[in-house]
Amino acid sequence: MSNGMSEEQIRALAKKRVEAKRGFLVHFAIYIAVNTGLVVIWLFATGRGFPWFIFPIFGWGIGALFHYLGAYHAKGASGGPGSAAIEKEAEKIRKG
């Protein structure tokens, strides 16, 4: 096994990575929905004054960016949710 890891450890790490990616996708979907709602509120309820919605978009966007980097760029992360993705991730771990 690569890196001295057992097959169980490889699969556990692969599952953790796939779950991290799924978590990011949920986070990003909520980010888009909430911030779209804030822009709509600004458009229709506040008279289109100062675009205050940019502050939560920017602040939360920084957090979403770091979540993305942690989920997709952590030691060869790849694949989407599901058992096929777990197996694909495990294969990457085995190869090193």
Image (cartoon, helix red, strand yellow):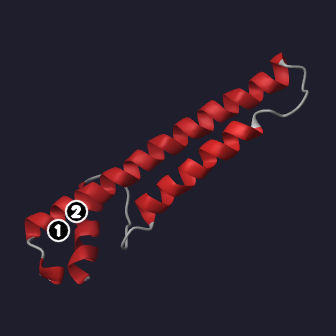
Q: Position of residue 26 (x, y in %)?
A: 45, 41
Amino acid type shown at disc 2:
Leu
Inspect this view and state whether residue 66 appears.
Answer: yes
Q: Quadrant of residue 43?
A: top right
In the image, is residue 94 above or below residue 62? below
Closest to the observer, 55 or 86: 55
Q: Do labels 1 and 2 touch, CB within 8 Å?
A: yes
Determine whether the residue tagged by mark 2 lies in a helix, strand or loop. Answer: helix
Q: Residue at x 85, y 19 (%)?
A: 46
* Residues packed near mark 1 inside 10 Å, few (<14), some (14 to 19) or many (20 plus): many
Answer left or right for 51 relative to 76: right
Q: Compared with residue 93, is residue 31 higher up or lower down, i.e. above or below?
A: above
Q: Which mark is residue 13?
A: 2
Q: Which mark is residue 49?
A: none
Closer to the camera, 60 or 28?
Answer: 60
User: Residue 82: x percent and y percent?
Assistant: 29, 52
Badge 2, how many Cα within 10 Å: few under 14, some, many 20+? some
- Measured as percent of width and height from the top left, residue 68 is found at 49, 57
* Residue marked by disc 1: 10
- Taking the image as shown, residue 96 lies to the left or right of residue 28, namely left
* Circle 1: element type: helix
Q: Is residue 20 left or right of residue 55?
A: left
| Quadrant assignment, res 45 | top right
Visible in this render: residue 81? no
Residue 33, by quadrant, is: top right
In x, y percent, where is residue 16?
26, 56
For the N terminus, the quadrant is bottom left
- Quarter of the figure with the C terminus: bottom left
Vertical relation: 65 (above or below) 30: below
How far, Cα to Cα, is label 1 from label 2? Answer: 5 Å
At label 1, the amino acid type is Ile
